Amino acid sequence: MVTDGTWRNWAGNVTVTPARWQRPGSTAEIALAVQAAAADGLTVHAVGSGHSFTPIAVAPGVALDLSGWTGIVAADTRTGLVTVRSGTRLRELNADLDRLGLALANLGDIDVQTVAGAVSTGTHGTGAKLGGLATQIEALEMVLADGSVVACSELDRPDLFAAARVGLGALGIITEVTLRCVPSFTLAAQEGPEPVEDVIARFGELAAAHDHFEFYWIPNGRNALVKQNNRLPAGQQAAPLSAARRFYEYEVMENAAFGLLCRAGRRAPRIIPRLNRITSAALSRRSYSDHSHRVFTTPRRVRFVESEYAIPAATAPEVLDELRREVPKLADPVMFPVEVRVAAADDIWLSTASGRASAYIAIHQYRGLPYEAYFALFESIVAGVGGRPHWGKMHTLGADRLRELYPQFEAFGKIRNEIDPDGRFTNPYLDRVLGAPHGRRPAGPA
Ligand SMILES: Cc1cc2nc3c(=O)[nH]c(=O)nc-3n(C[C@H](O)[C@H](O)[C@H](O)COP(=O)(O)OP(=O)(O)OC[C@H]3O[C@@H](n4cnc5c(N)ncnc54)[C@H](O)[C@@H]3O)c2cc1C
């Protein structure tokens, strides 16, 4: 969100007033904006929809607003290859793909991010046989620091492609993304409460048994809310929730009523464990089927802060057991559920699932409630199993530790130094997590 030139992220925990804003409407204008920033000695950064919790999108120099750079450029319904402008929001893309009889094979749980913003941080959904959004990229076009426009794919500049699919905004401005889409499909959703001990004990088996498996555990509660989404065979009729039920489930229960509980908990934190037990006991069952993107994504109106780590999938039960033991001992109670998802290993250098089948554990706290001790506890637990933080979600790691966690960390740095030696695309967060590029002093605290 931008007010009087000041940019604020969705969670409200990051703000910046860029030296100037630009709203390019073509690849040529994006290239000109990068060249003009260089001429003025300014850094340049594209801002997406501001849904990262980390200061990754902070643009102290030139902020590029790509909201006028949207829509599908080319689509081949036979191969499923669709080229989209980088500022397109996932929601618009999903609607356009629907009309073409296509869909993304997997999505995260919201659809308001921009395509480039989502892939650049390694945004993912869940599915033991599927990777994050960036694994669905076939090719990229981007503007580099010298203003040149380059394309990359498995065949064309493969190293740049391996780096730039999850590029953190550090390598250039992505202008177009070619995605490998699949024919539209219907997902059958089954959701309901299960005792959390059972879900953790059967974690590997459940993740393997369903196309998309995830669960939420509310600290202090006994139950997990388990979500199992499976593809229906082509042609099978969908049985969606009625508009009224959808409104009740998503707007009333998951947003309005939950927001009310959160506000009550913030006013009187000592009642939070009781509220959590009540919410956990009140979890209900629902099953329905719908277009895939309507099952994957839901509105999120209650604001929170979040941290998420990818850990080796097999370590999830021990990490969750430790969290369950330790979280109730925290002085400040936790008002938001823990979310657990899975992804297949991939070959993208800085993808959080690079080279290993992963479980994602995401922790949240309602905005305005203390979260520091909780997030520090979580980080200390996942550190023991080589946890890698989501690039867009809060964490305290720096380049020294991240270098140990990513076998291709140096290769990424080498490419970055080659194509952006002056750090045109850096910001304080990128200096922290990647190190300052050659020839440039760190940009400041992050
Ligand atoms: C309510 C909520 C739900 C979420 N759910 C999920 C989830 O289910 N799964 C998950 O993995 N994450 C999730 N996230 C995190 C979110 O998907 C990521 O932080 C994502 O990066 C946000 O996209 P954005 O468009 O807001 O990008 P921003 O946060 O604005 O930017 C992210 C990065 O992308 C870069 N960037 C943007 N455009 C370009 C471009 N054209 N070229 C180069 N770099 C660019 C920015 O410079 C920045 O470095 C969620 C976040 C919120 C707030």
Image: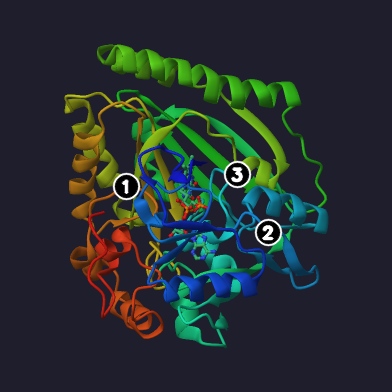
Q: Position of residue 159 (x, y in %)?
A: 45, 84
Q: Which residue position holds label 3?
A: 296
Q: Which image quarter holds the C terminus?
A: bottom left
Q: CA distance from mark 2 to mark 1?
A: 28 Å
In the image, what residue type sits under mark 2?
A: Thr
Q: Residue at x 65, y 31 (%)?
A: 287
Nearest to the observer: residue 312 or residue 369: 369
Q: Residue at x 49, y 73 (%)?
A: 36
Q: Closer to the N terminus: mark 2 or mark 1?
A: 2
Rendered view: 321 above or below 414: above
| Residue 436 at x, y percent in the picture | 26, 71
SS state under label 2: loop
Mark 3, other Cα within 10 Å: few <14 / some 14–19 / many ≥20: many
292 or 74: which is nearer to us? 74
| Residue bearing mark 1 | 394
Relative to 340, 3 lies left or right: right
Tag 1: amino acid: Met
| Residue marked by disc 2 | 70
The spot of residue 300 in percent (x, y) is: 53, 34
Question: Nearer the observer, disc 2 or disc 1?
Answer: 2
Q: Is ligand 1 closer than 8 angstroms to the Cβ of mark 1?
A: no
Amino acid type, mark 3: Phe
Q: Residue at x 51, y 17 (%)?
A: 257
Q: Is residue 258 left or right of residue 290?
A: left
Q: Is residue 248 left or right of residue 278?
A: right
The answer to whether the beta carbon of the residue marked 2 is less than 8 Å from any atom of ligand 1 is no
Q: Quadrant of residue 29?
A: bottom right
Q: Residue at x 32, y 13 (%)?
A: 267
